[in-house]
Amino acid sequence: MTDISTQPQTDTNDTPTIPNDTPDMILDLSPVTVTVTRTPCACGCGEMPQRPTARFVPGHDAKLKSMLIKAHLDGVQVIQLTDKAGTRDLSPLELATELDWDGFLLVAERKRDREVAAREARKAEKSA
Ligand SMILES: [Zn+2]
C-alpha cells in the first residue's frame, strides 16, 4: 500500500498561477458526430449536389427543364416522381409548375403552335 504523503513531491512554486476567471473566448473544437441526409440531383441523374442545400448538380436544372419541355411537347401524360413526400404521378406541366417553370413549357408550346401554323400556311399557299 502506498502512502501518498511519502511520494516525492514536485516543486510547484515555479509554476505561475493561472487566474481562475471566466475566459473571454472559448474555442471548443472537439469532434461531433452529425448525420446528414442528402438528396440526389433533382434531374434524376443520381449524382449528389456539392452543397447540401442545392437541388441540382450545376447545369442539371437546365437538363431537367429541357426534358420537361420535350416531354410536354411530345404529349407525355404521366411522370412518376418520387421525393420526400412519396411517389406520385404528375404531368410534365404539373411538375414544371411545382418548380415554377411552367412558363417555359407554355412558351415552347406557343412557339411550336406558331411554327405549325406557319408551315400549314406556306403549304396552303403553295397548293393554291
Ligand atoms: Zn442531375
Image: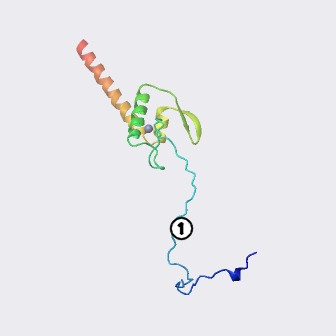
Q: In the image as oriented, which residue stretches furthest toward the top?
A: 127
Query: Is residue 106 toward the left or the right of residue 82 in the image?
Result: left
What is the count of numbered marks?
1
In front here: 36 or 77? 36
Q: Quadrant of the N terminus?
A: bottom right
**Vertical arrangement, residue 22 with respect to residue 71, above or below:** below
Q: Is residue 20 left or right of residue 101?
A: right
| x and y percentages locating residue 32 in the rendered image | 57, 59
Where's residue 61, x and y in %? Answer: 41, 40
Which one is nearer the viewer's eye here, 4 or 71? Answer: 4
Q: Is residue 128 visible?
A: no
Q: Is residue 121 above or below residue 94?
A: above
Quadrant of ligand 1 in image:
top left
User: Toward the viewer: 56 or 86?
Assistant: 56
Q: Is mark 1 within 8 Å of ligand 1?
A: no
Furthest toward the right, the residue is: 1
Q: Amino acid at mark 1?
A: Asp
**In which image quadrant can residue 82 be found?**
top right
Residue under the point 59% across and 41% down: 85
Q: Position of residue 8 (x, y in %)?
A: 64, 81
The reply to whether residue 29 is in sight is yes
Q: Position of residue 101 (x, y in %)?
A: 42, 40
Q: Compared with residue 25, is residue 72 higher up or lower down, i.e. above or below? A: above
Q: Nearer the viewer, residue 33 or 93?
A: 33
The residue to which callout 1 is attached is 28
Residue 128 occupies quadrant: top left
